[in-house]
């Protein structure tokens, strides 16, 4: 189970060039990307050598016939259900068929983001298993005003019909159970049979993996062990956060 990050704010071309300290203005393919990204949209990511690329947010499994990731079809189906590959759980990124080749080949990337968004359902630390009927979109920026660089994996896929090479990437997530701020986000996980919330100790709250500027090159170019050591949850003080709707009066129970 576990929750996912499905929406984030991008930087403009000019903001990204300034953030990366690029001397030469990039010749971006047009159109570039939207200011707010969801799964399967095109967005920027950064690879070894701090080289920016643009690709699909959602990795395409090896052998896929289409750029939209899908499970194998069940009997009687023309096509399988869509797969969610915009997030890679750190616990499975080494073994999951969609992600393991990228991890093994050192295809780690950084995803620039102005903010990322999660749903708040009214959960409190005193009562983490109840929720409202409707969530409030909650945005997380850096407290220091800088953009995020979020850890990811990337790859390329060749369209068998057209021969087009499609760059694609995924955002790594990690467990954040017990975090004073981030553990308040997302619905409680439920038992698939009873539909009742699982006990607190069996919940699996997730968050993204921010990488500090001083560690960018280690994440992109270091060993697997060095990169994996960077997967940590920042303290609550690292975040500036609030409702996506500035008129909302909802406040977190912190």
Image: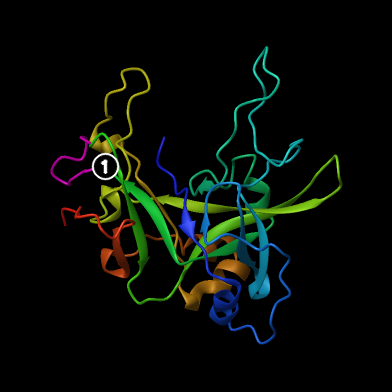
* Outermost residue, front side: 247
Colour scheme shown:
rainbow
Is the residue 180 above or below the residue 199 in the image?
A: below
Please tell me whether mark 1 sits on a helix, a strand or a loop.
loop
Mark 1, other Cα within 10 Å: few <14 / some 14–19 / many ≥20: many
Asked if residue 120 lies left or right of residue 92, the reply is left
* Outermost residue, left side: 126
In front of the other: 129 or 30:
30
Is the residue 56 above or below the residue 196 in the image?
A: below
Quadrant in which residue 238 is drawn: bottom left
In percent of the image, x 74 and y 74: which residue is there? 27
Asked if residue 7 lies left or right of residue 74, the reply is left
Give the position of the N terminus as an image quadrant: top left
Residue 123 lies in the magenta-colored region: yes
In percent of the image, x 50 and y 74: which residue is there? 215
* Outermost residue, bottom side: 23
- Percent across and percent down for residue 227 are 53, 64
- Percent across and percent down for residue 196 are 27, 24
In front of the other: 64 or 34:
34
Give the position of the C terminus as an image quadrant: bottom left
In front of the other: 110 or 18:
18
Total numbered labels: 1
Residue 239 lies in the magenta-colored region: no
Residue at which label 1 appears? 121
The residue stretch that appears in magenta:
121-131
- Percent across and percent down for residue 175 are 38, 49
């Amino acid at each position: 189970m576990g929750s996912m990050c499905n929406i984030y704010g991008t930087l403009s071309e000019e903001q990204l060039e300034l953030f990366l300290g690029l001397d030469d203005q990039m010749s971006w393919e047009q159109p570039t990307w939207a200011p707010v990204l969801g799964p399967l949209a095109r967005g920027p990511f950064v690879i070894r050598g701090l080289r920016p690329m643009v690709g699909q947010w959602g990795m395409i499994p090896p052998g896929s016939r289409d750029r939209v990731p899908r499970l194998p079809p069940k009997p009687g189906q023309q096509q399988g259900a869509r797969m969610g590959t915009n997030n890679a759980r750190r616990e499975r990124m080494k073994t999951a068929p969609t992600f393991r080749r990228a991890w093994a080949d050192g295809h780690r990337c950084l995803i620039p983001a102005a903010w990322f968004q999660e749903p708040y359902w009214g959960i409190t630390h005193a009562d983490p298993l109840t929720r409202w009927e409707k969530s409030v979109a909650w945005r997380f920026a850096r407290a220091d005003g800088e953009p995020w660089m979020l850890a990811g994996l990337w790859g390329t896929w060749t369209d068998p019909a057209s021969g087009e090479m499609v760059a694609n990437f995924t955002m790594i997530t990690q467990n954040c159970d017990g975090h004073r701020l981030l553990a308040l986000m997302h619905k409680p996980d439920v038992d698939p049979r009873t539909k009742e919330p699982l006990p607190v100790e069996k919940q699996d709250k997730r968050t993204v993996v921010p990488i500090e500027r001083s560690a960018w090159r280690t994440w992109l170019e270091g060993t697997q062990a060095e990169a994996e050591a960077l997967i940590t949850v920042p303290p609550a003080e690292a975040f500036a956060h609030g409702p996506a709707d500035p008129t909302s009066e909802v406040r977190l129970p912190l």
